[in-house]
């Protein structure tokens, strides 16, 4: 029987496998955003932006007032100034419109009025003022019209900006082909002769629902600021 002796093992000792090292995930640092610094505004720019905000607020308030006033009844729907003036008084009677509009036939204007049917006498003016016909082809009278419009015509609420129509433009605008000098009217102070108001009109041929009528287009309606308290417009 064969005998076995203890012999050292020729097999190398087995090493335990190295532990698998997992990559360490470091937190990603987001770039630091520096606070945006608003530009330093000048005092004039700050004032301008403040005025814009105020005008927006005023416009919103005016719109709210307009919506509220639309619900007034017919007897309350009167304007303190315009309801006393020789202008069309269109009293709304509901969704259908004015009484004239309800009764009119298709193709008819709201009110057909001829020159012969209009008032021939000028409307009375407050004491100390008189009507006058303006001749804008005369340089001195054109200069009067220009000065009045330049100082008292359309302007913003802050009284900072006004339209500045040049003298040649004014003459061109109110003297189209076929114009009538009788349609250029002014109001003057009797004592000084200073022009205090102006209204101009040019002829227009309008087509309303297929019916052509001769009309006038009003423009450059202006009254000196001091006369507006005298109920002139």
Image (spheres, rainbow, N blue to C red):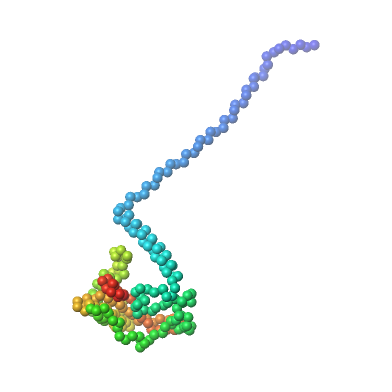
Left or right of 174? Residue 111 is: right
The x and y percentages for residue 37 are: 37, 47
Left or right of 148? Residue 79 is: right
User: Which residue is at the front of the view, 108 or 174?
Assistant: 108
User: Which residue is at the front of the view, 186 or 228?
Assistant: 228
Q: Quadrant of the C terminus?
A: bottom left
Q: In which quarter of the view is residue 188 placed?
A: bottom left
Q: Is residue 166 visible?
A: no
Residue shown at the point (47%, 39%) measured from the top left = 29
Q: Is residue 147 visible?
A: yes
Q: Residue furthest right?
A: 1
Residue 23 higher or lower than 193, as above or below = above
The x and y percentages for residue 63 are: 41, 65
Residue 38 higher or lower than 228, as above or below = above
Q: In which quarter of the view is residue 205 placed?
A: bottom left
User: Which residue is at the front of the view, 52 or 75?
Assistant: 75
The x and y percentages for residue 187 are: 26, 78
Q: Quadrant of the N terminus?
A: top right
Residue shown at the point (64%, 22%) measured from the top left = 14
Q: Residue furthest left?
A: 191
Residue 167 higher or lower than 212, as above or below = above
Left or right of 60? Residue 171 is: left
């Amino acid at each position: 029987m064969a005998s076995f002796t203890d012999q050292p093992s020729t097999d190398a000792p087995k090493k335990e496998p190295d532990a698998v090292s997992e990559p360490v995930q470091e937190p990603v640092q987001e770039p630091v955003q520096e606070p945006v610094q608003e530009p330093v505004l000048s005092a004039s720019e700050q004032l301008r932006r403040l005025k814009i905000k105020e005008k927006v607020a005023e416009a919103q308030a005016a719109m709210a007032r307009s919506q509220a006033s639309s619900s007034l009844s017919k007897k309350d729907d009167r304007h303190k100034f315009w309801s006393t003036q020789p202008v069309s008084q269109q009293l709304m009677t509901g969704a259908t419109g004015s009484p004239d509009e309800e009764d009119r036939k298709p193709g008819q204007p709201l009110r057909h009025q001829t020159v012969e049917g209009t008032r021939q006498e000028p409307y009375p003016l407050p004491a100390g003022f008189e009507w006058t016909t303006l001749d804008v082809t005369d340089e001195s009278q054109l200069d009067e019209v220009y000065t009045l419009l330049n100082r008292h015509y359309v302007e913003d609420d802050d009284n900072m900006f006004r339209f500045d129509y040049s003298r040649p433009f004014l003459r061109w605008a109110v003297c189209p082909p076929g114009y009538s000098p009788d349609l250029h009217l002014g109001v003057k102070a009797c004592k000084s002769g200073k022009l205090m108001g102006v209204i101009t009109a040019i002829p227009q041929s309008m087509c309303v629902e297929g019916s052509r009528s001769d009309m006038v287009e009003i423009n450059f309606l202006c009254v000196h600021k001091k006369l507006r308290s005298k109920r002139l417009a």
